[in-house]
Amino acid sequence: MTDAQMTALAASTATAGEILSSHLTAQAGAFLRALPQAVGEVGARPGSVAASSAGTEDLLRAVRRIGGVLHTFAATFEPAWAQESRTELRWLLNLLAQEPGYVRRSARLLGALDTLSGAEPGSGLRGPGMLAGHAGAPKARALLDRQLTLARTRVHSSVLQELRSARLHALADRMTLLVGEVPLLAQADGRAAVVLLPQATAALAALGAGAERLPLHRAATPYGGDGMRRLGSVPAARGALDADALMAADDEPWHQVRILLKRARYALEVCARPAEGLDALDVTLALHQDAADAAAHAATAARTPRITPATAYVLGVVHADQRLEVEAARYAFGRQWPDISPSIDGWEEPPAPRMA
């Protein structure tokens, strides 16, 4: 349990402002401690995948939590300050998440291609993969490796430049001030149970509503064949029937639920409520997003000009393999969600602490 969670277990007379200030102060401190290490890690790994990323992960964790709290409990903060802070935190989050995203995509796609081309030692798989001996497999692997390495290198250079910018220094100054004082409204002087619980409950309700809108009936079987053959309804505003746009529109509700899920988790942290079930769902939806992103990259690579039909075929197989991973994650979410949603409906005020 974190210091912020311990603070949230304060007596029922604790104010919302006291709990939020303690929580944000702790997260801002984590931000400031992780920032130098994260900047050093980015500077020390020019294209290297093996370099340490502990500082970057800690920084991203703090950024997500601060942004989530500012969103969920927005009614208790000074509006202009909260909106500006969220904008800058979102900028840093999107910036730092790019390179790790390419690293995961490379590992996923190249690993899938290696598995499809032949059973890897120690994998427990028997017999050759369906692409074993295929003439296009080595060329497809080389193409993916080259494209992903180039993209990661470009992102790395961009991130390194931005981390030296005045914008990052201004955000660090903002976090330094946050450690000392949180800009709160008069509403934050109310009891935590009265002020915070309704806002946290609204975050949980938004998650429940988002999950209810998912086409879980299409993910009701372990093998999502129907899910691969039939996409969900796509708004007419999407325009012409472009395959990439349709696939992205089909994935978007799931990505949105992941955002709602993170906000609900962070709200539970502020109120010191357990979120083990939501943690597991977050892992499932992270796998869903990684597989969807990998599939999109494979589809784009298959349209690379002047590649051989054999190479394009292999990339098409890899794309289908990753879409099956997407459907598997959706099936897993559908199996987990009914066990989680009742605890959301029955969520109550945190208990008063036991006296020593």
Image (cartoon, rainbow, N blue to C red):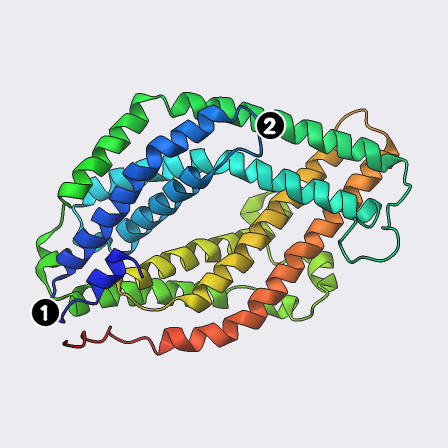
Please give left or right for residue 189 compared with residue 340 in the image. left
The x, y position of residue 91, in whole percent, is 38, 35
Pinpoint residue 124: horizontal percent, then vertical percent: 78, 58
**Residue flagged by tag 1: what amino acid is it?**
Thr
Report crowding for label 1: few under 14, some 14 to 19, many 20 or more residues within 10 A (C-alpha): few
Where residue 134 sits, quadrant-wise, is top right
Indicate the secondary structure of the residue bearing disc 2: helix
- Camera-side residue: 15 or 220? 15
Q: Regarding mark 1 in the picture, which secondary structure is present there?
A: loop
Q: CA distance from mark 1 to mark 2?
A: 53 Å
Instruction: Judge left or right: residue 138 versus residue 83.
Output: right
Quadrant in which the C terminus is drawn: bottom left
* Residue at the disc numbered 1: 13
Residue at 24% over, 74% down: 349
Q: Could one spot residue 88 in this view of the protein? A: yes
Q: Which mark is residue 151?
A: 2
Among numbered discs 1 and 2, the one appearing first in the sequence: 1
Asked if 339 appears above or below 308 in the picture, the reply is below
Q: Position of residue 162 (x, y in %)?
A: 40, 24
Which quarter of the image is occupied by the N terminus? bottom left
Residue at (70% x, 31% y) in the render: 145
- Depth check, front residue: 164 or 1: 1
Rendered view: 261 above or below 165: below
Residue 249 point in image, percent of width and height: 57, 49
Badge 2 amino acid: Ala
